[in-house]
Image (cartoon, rainbow, N blue to C red):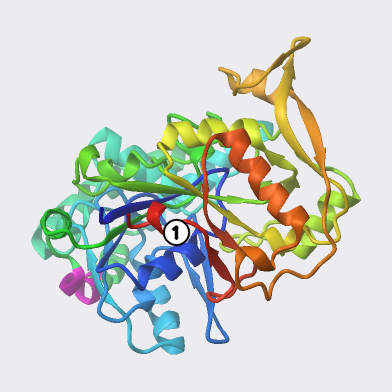
């Protein structure tokens, strides 16, 4: 088995970037399959901190092919800036390729994102205003500009002129300022000149790698409960960060996926609006936020923090067909005291062990908690399972049992080295 999907099991920010970096060194191809620069990964290695928004974390491994798949929404300006700051820290990077089918994010997308969010008033979704939603809207309406069009000078000018004329009317209706076509075309044509060599056929590359038994890692952004279909709609993203999105956004079939690792924190966090039954509004929640540095990589917004929700995590495991869990941020829970985990919800006076069918029910659900012993020890230097305190081991085993999913990897700190692999067979087979 040689294909592996890394997926977020919660509401994003589960430290997937670190795991993709750790496993990316073992992969020949790393593919980002969904989302845009509305998501962020942080990788800490060799005393350097890398912040990724578009680039696959596998880019740090020289000789690895890193691909931005057709399911992505790519901001050219953001991509070039990210490449520049990444090369400033590490000049030699992997081979970056961009699918011609990936959609391009333009300034009018960002402007419309902000205008639409403002127009919602008190019903804000909590977007990052990076233009990702409006870009995917264009994709569905079949008016979007794809990378293959973007790097073709003749096609780009004609397509952009048509789209800008329409978007200017829309922005005027929403109280925004129209955009000047010529200046926009000139700026983005310059970006296209720099990006053009990277835009190559990628579906065939991935399919051939899979057919030849190469190790291919599929990297998701955000998390399961932000998925457009399976998340807490409407408080979701505009793409498919679930494991199924790896097929939609890359051109490989479902039977080509061997293993799926679901990354989850030892607690729960969420950014923006939407249901979050185990959210903490007290000193413990603030302690977790500060110890975990729970502030957005992209926006800097403080994340909502709460206890681990095992009802949601079990549902996530089933949605994604997880072969194993990657439990991260275990070190953050030191000195928190007794730890609670949600094992059920009370909805309309009845206790249920599954996720409610509507966001309204989920919003009103009261968590049913079990209390586990916490730990005070610093575990960041542990090298193996046996080095971990018994209470940490008990916590991991409880999560495995409650979700019917074995733990494959434990992360006990932000650095690449602070990783304990428990089940190598659940990774590459």
Most foreground residue, 308 or 280? 308
Q: Quadrant of the C terminus?
A: bottom left
The residue pinned by badge 1 equals: 37
Q: Say which of 206 and 336 sits in front.
A: 336
What residue sits 40% from the left and 63% below the top? 54
Residue 321 rendering spot, x and y as whole percentages:
40, 36
10 Å neighbourhood of mark 1: few (<14), some, or many (≥20)?
Answer: many
Residue 13: image x %, image y %?
57, 54
Residue 69 sits in quarter: bottom left
* Pick the front one: 15 or 106: 15
Residue 325, percent from left and from top: 51, 48
Q: Is residue 124 magenta?
A: no
The reply to whether residue 176 is visible in this rendering is no
Q: Residue 304, how many percent across, how many down?
A: 72, 47
Q: Residue at x 49, y 36 (%)?
A: 317
Q: Which residues are magenta?
A: 192-198
Write down the quadrant of residue 74 in the picture.
Answer: bottom left
Element type at mark 1: loop
Image-based side of 183 in relation to 153, left or right: right
Residue at the (24%, 38%) spot, across then down: 254
Q: Is residue 91 left or right of residue 44?
A: left
């Amino acid at each position: 088995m040689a294909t592996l999907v890394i997926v977020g099991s919660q509401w994003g920010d589960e430290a997937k970037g670190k795991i993709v970096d750790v496993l990316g060194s073992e992969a020949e191809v790393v593919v980002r399959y969904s989302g845009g620069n509305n998501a962020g990964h942080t990788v800490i290695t060799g005393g350097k901190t890398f912040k990724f928004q578009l680039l696959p974390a596998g880019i740090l491994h020289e000789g690895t092919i890193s691909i931005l798949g057709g399911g992505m929404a790519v901001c050219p300006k953001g991509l070039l800036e990210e490449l520049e700051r990444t090369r400033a820290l590490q000049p030699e990077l992997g081979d970056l390729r961009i699918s011609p089918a990936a959609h391009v994010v333009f300034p009018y997308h960002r402007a419309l994102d902000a205008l639409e969010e403002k127009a919602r008033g008190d019903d804000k979704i909590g977007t990052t205003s990076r233009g990702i939603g409006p870009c995917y809207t264009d994709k569905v309406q079949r008016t979007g500009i794809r990378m293959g069009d973007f790097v073709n000078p003749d096609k780009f000018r004609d397509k952009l002129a048509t789209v800008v004329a329409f978007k200017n009317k829309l922005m005027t209706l929403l109280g925004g300022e129209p955009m000047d076509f010529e200046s926009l075309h000139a700026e983005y044509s310059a970006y296209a000149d720099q990006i053009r060599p990277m835009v190559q056929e990628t579906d065939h590359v991935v399919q051939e790698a899979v057919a030849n038994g190469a190790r291919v890692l599929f990297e998701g952004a955000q998390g399961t409960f932000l998925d457009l279909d399976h998340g807490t709609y409407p408080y979701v993203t505009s793409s498919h960060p679930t494991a199924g999105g790896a097929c939609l956004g890359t051109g490989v079939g479902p039977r080509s996926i061997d293993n799926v690792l679901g990354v989850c924190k030892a607690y729960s966090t969420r950014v923006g609006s939407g249901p979050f039954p185990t959210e903490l509004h007290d000193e413990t929640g603030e302690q977790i936020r500060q110890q975990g540095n729970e502030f957005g990589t992209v926006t800097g917004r403080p994340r909502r923090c709460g206890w681990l929700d095992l009802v949601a995590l079990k549902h996530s495991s089933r949605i994604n067909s997880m072969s194993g869990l990657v439990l991260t941020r275990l070190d953050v829970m030191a000195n928190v005291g007794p730890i609670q985990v949600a094992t059920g919800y009370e909805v309309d006076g009845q206790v249920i062990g599954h996720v409610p069918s509507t966001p309204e029910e989920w919003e009103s659900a009261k968590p049913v908690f079990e209390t586990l012993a916490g730990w005070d020890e610093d575990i960041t230097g542990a090298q193996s399972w046996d080095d971990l305190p018994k209470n940490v081991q008990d916590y991991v085993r409880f999560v495995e049992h409650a979700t019917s999913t074995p733990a494959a990897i434990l992360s006990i700190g932000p650095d690449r080295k602070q990783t304990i692999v428990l089940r190598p067979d659940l990774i590459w087979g």
